[in-house]
Amino acid sequence: MLSRLISLVVLVWLLVGVLAAYQRGYLKSDPSNCAKAGTIVATMVVGPLNYAGVNPKIRCVTPQPSK
């Protein structure tokens, strides 16, 4: 019974995160780079904390090829 409750809480948490990402317009286009994809995922994982003022932003730097 406890595992079902925990599963339900996690599912609702993630659904609220998806709703927050949708409301911010992150899901309207394909992520064009690593930072945008990371921000979308972070927003979904943070879940309801988005509505408490958390605004996750991810920055990533991809290595440049050597010449």
Image: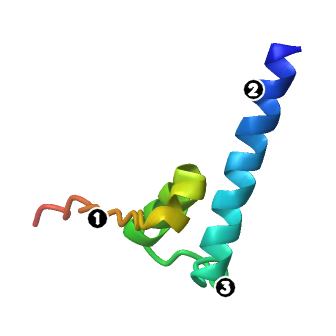
First along the sequence among labels 3 and 2: 2
Question: Secondary structure beneath disc 2?
Answer: helix
Q: Quadrant of residue 27?
A: bottom right
Expressed as whole percent of the image width and height from the top left, the position of residue 45 reads 56, 50
Q: Is residue 4 above or below residue 26?
A: above
Q: Is residue 24 left or right of residue 34?
A: right
Residue 44 circle label: none
Q: Residue at (81%, 15%) from the top-left corner?
A: 2
Please give the residue where the numbered disc 2 appears in the rendered image: 6
State the quadrant of the N terminus. top right
First along the sequence among labels 1 and 3: 3
Name which residue type carries label 1: Arg
Q: Which is nearer the eye, 48 or 57?
A: 48
Disc 3 versus disc 2: distance between alpha carbons? 30 Å
Labels 2, 1: front one: 2
Disc 1 versus disc 3: distance between alpha carbons? 20 Å
Q: Is residue 17 left or right of residue 51?
A: right
Please give the residue where the numbered disc 1 appears in the rendered image: 59
Expressed as whole percent of the image width and height from the top left, the position of residue 21 reads 61, 71
Q: Residue at (20%, 62%) from the top-left corner?
A: 65
Q: Residue at (28%, 61%) from the top-left corner?
A: 60
Q: Quadrant of residue 18?
A: bottom right
Q: Residue at (68%, 47%) from the top-left corner?
A: 13
Expressed as whole percent of the image width and height from the top left, the position of residue 59 reads 28, 64
Label 1: how many residues lie within 10 Å, few (<14), some (14-19) or many (20+)?
few
First along the sequence among labels 2 and 1: 2
Label 2: how many residues lie within 10 Å, few (<14), some (14-19) or many (20+)?
few
Disc 2 versus disc 1: distance between alpha carbons? 31 Å
Q: Is residue 15 above or below residue 2?
A: below
Q: Is residue 64 left or right of residue 57?
A: left
Whether tag 1 and tag 3 are in contact, CB under 8 A, the answer is no
Please give the residue where the numbered disc 3 appears in the rendered image: 28
